[in-house]
Image (spheres, rainbow, N blue to C red):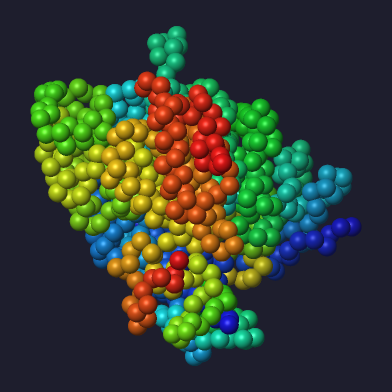
Amino acid sequence: MYKYDQYDQAMVDARVEEFRDQARRRLEGKLTEDQFKPLRLMNGLYLQLHAYMLRVAIPYGTLNSRQMEALADIAEKYDRGYGHFTTRQNIQYNWIKLEDAADILADLATVEMHAIQTSGNCIRNISADHFAGAAADEIIDPRPYAELMRQWSSFHPEFTYLPRKFKIAVIGSETDRAAMRLHDIGIRIVRRASDSGAEVGAQFFAGGGMGRTPMIAPLIRDFVPLDQLITYAEACLRVYNRYGRRDNKYKARIKILVHELGAAEYTRQVEEEFAHMLSVGVEPPHEELARIAEYFAPPAFVDGPKTLDRSDPDFALWVDRNTHRHKHDAYVSAVISLKPAGGIPGDATADQMRLMARLAKQYSFDELRVMHTQNVLLPHVRIADLHAVWTALEEAGLGSPNMDTIEDIIACPGLDYCSLANARSIPLAQRISERFAQSGRTEIVGELKLKISGCINACGHHHAGHIGILGVDKKGTENYQLSLGGSEAEDVSLAKITGPGFDEDGVIAAVEKVTDVYLAARADGERFLDTYRRIGMEPFKEALYGA
Amino acid sequence: MKILTGNDLRSGAVTWWNGTGWSLFVDDAVDVGDDAEEILAREEAARRVNVPYAIEATIDAGGHVRPAHIKDRVRALGPTVRRDLAVPTADKTGWDWVI
Amino acid sequence: MAHNLGTSPDEVQFRFRDDEPVDHGTVTVDSALEQTNANAVRIEPGDDARLLLPFLDRLALVEVNFPSFGDGRGYSAARILREAGYAGELRAVGQVLIDQLSHMRRCGFDSFAPDKRLDEEDALRAFATWENVYQRAADRRATIADKRHEA
Ligand code: HEM
Ligand code: SF4
């Protein structure tokens, strides 16, 4: 894992003091709320439905046990004993006081954490494949590049008042586990043949996003050499900062610019700026990447048993569902589900955080990952230790065997917490997961990604759900639109709306109906998404709305 | 009737205008009639409340203040999915009126 | 003469240069392109700073207007001018607030004429916020990465 040196530490410490001063000026009335808002947002502090909400960055989702314990302490000391893990690998606290915020940031700084740029119209926390450094199919660990970009994007003098927020994701395998092409910039680190053997570089995609006009990012450059990575990113951002729309907040994301200009024209402008930037020299020295990469060297894996005792069926089910193939065959990555049937997706109590921290220390080289699916991962667990890990998780209510099933729902905070919401998301997730768990249909249905957003901002990724649910306002009551066929993986696609919306009971029944259609129609080995792609929308519509 | 709500600047807590100050309890909210703009401007400038706004509300048969919009009803009591964290009101009618 | 635009030297609250300030107003980018003798120009957020590049050596003052502090196009304009070698005064005007000062400075601004005067103490603290920096920018400060790897 990356470790701060004195410079990184000084930067976050300076930021804490800067924010303390800003908060003081706000409380003294030297700043109006309009002036203070972008400043607090750039430190992750929102004003939400019930209180201030603080979003803490977990860069590329990686953290150690000490950091997880600090998150638990903050939940207890300043909040109400819990936190909410988000789809962008952050954690949010819902009950924060402005007068405590600087102290919380100071506490975070003691464990090399911060809330810098977790909101605001700036470059946000950079996310990455949560299986980075662990997955068997990984070509290159994306985290060193993500860390390089974290430093470059922190307090960037030119790009702090962009037209709109800017999100970057980095992956290093064919499989996309970070919704890379639904980001403002998506980067895939790739290897290509060259005269001197293999050369590593970055593929750039630009102009993806969700929200009210979802778009899949087109490829804008197939290969950026590693010693020009920052320069190229800088060129992408400069073109956006200069020409992204500022007349309409809903058209201000880079996806609209790329769409209106066309990918080819945007690319041309970026290339021109890039050529200029190369002459200016903004790239960090190349040794810097090597320095960072050292921190991500693989831990000292040891050989061990590759099989396990499957005589306990509950354990065997959890292993099948919640573990993921590792680079080293004596290890797996183990998913800690924050989706107990009937629970709140992504919420964890302080005690649960501490347990996860302990398990990481004991069994996973002191490392945890926050997954974009709102779960937590132990990236490197010896197969020999799996039973012990599972037993501890079971006892803490964290052992649900439901990764990638219909119970593994992504849900935004919705109307229970969010001031922008039209409808609640969490109760739907609770009722659907409970119903499928009780009827035993979760296992029968298999992989099915259900995603719920409480409004068109799409924080719950509903456009990218195999099944998506969007909360809408219907004359002051909650109403839900159903959509089918989205995916955020390498087979990326945007979901299509089925038709008229439903009330809460109606949409839950509708989810059951579409899974019925799937079960009746599926061919061997097909996931819900595959069947939908093969048979199309009609049979589903028929079941939902037909006479 | 028209009532005023906002958040406390320091704590962020949801508050309601009770005629002389800001209360944590929606039942204390009073009808401000045509004075909304004036009170909002004055109170926000004095930093006794943050981003306040006026909303419609009614008083039910039991004398309880019920905001018209679902969002403000959720604000009045707390997240419907964490009833253990509800604002501790004297109103014993439960959650039925929120959603 | 369209010299009625812009801020006067009296309105400049912070200036990090020793030369004499230009004692007259600025012209728009459009007029500057037409008038071969204009030496002071004002850039609005929608203007393309690159149009000025052919005339940089005759310019002594460029004002970059921030009608709203949230519109960050002026930061790019400033850097573009400095990257092209502009050495005259680069003045941030308009809604210039405490918390934007350090970034503006890094983008190459060397004078500041906020439309509302800033608290001196708060502003001086703001200019000094970052003892070190991560990015290469117009101020040409050695970055943290440079320092980490200097021989
Ligand atoms: C409760 C406070 C929140 C607020 C006020 C909020 C606000 C917003 C807004 C306004 C957008 C739309 C941006 C645009 O299209 O320009 C957005 C997008 C998004 N939010 Fe949130 N959000 C909140 C919480 C969350 C949470 C908890 C998550 C993660 C679970 C999240 C993840 C996202 C994601 C992934 C997008 C991306 C969509 C895109 O790229 O267009 N947000 N959010
Ligand atoms: S999708 Fe809408 S309701 Fe849900 S968190 Fe985002 S802004 Fe709030």
Residue at 66 percent of width and 27 percent of height: A264
Q: Can residue A360 be seen in this view?
A: yes
Q: On the rendered structure, is A77 left or right of C109? A: left
Expressed as whole percent of the image width and height from the top left, the position of residue A464 reads 48, 38
Q: On the rendered structure, is B33 left or right of A346? A: right
Q: Is residue A461 visible?
A: no
In depth, the one of A317 and A388 nearer the eye is A317
Expressed as whole percent of the image width and height from the top left, the position of residue B38 reads 62, 84
In depth, the one of A312 and A332 nearer the eye is A312
Residue at 29 percent of width and 34 percent of height: A443
Which quarter shows the N terminus of chain C?
Answer: bottom right
Point out the residue furthest to the bottom here: B20
Residue at 33 percent of width and 22 percent of height: A137
Expressed as whole percent of the image width and height from the top left, the position of residue C53 reads 73, 39
Expressed as whole percent of the image width and height from the top left, the position of residue A547 reads 56, 41
Point out the residue furthest to the top here: A195
The number of numbered badges drawn on the structure is 0
Residue at 73 percent of width and 53 percent of height: C44
Point out the residue furthest to the right here: C1
Which quarter shows the C terminus of chain C?
Answer: top left
In depth, the one of A15 and A59 nearer the eye is A59
Say which quarter of the image contains residue A4. top left
Instruction: Tell me: residue C140, above or below residue C105.
Output: above
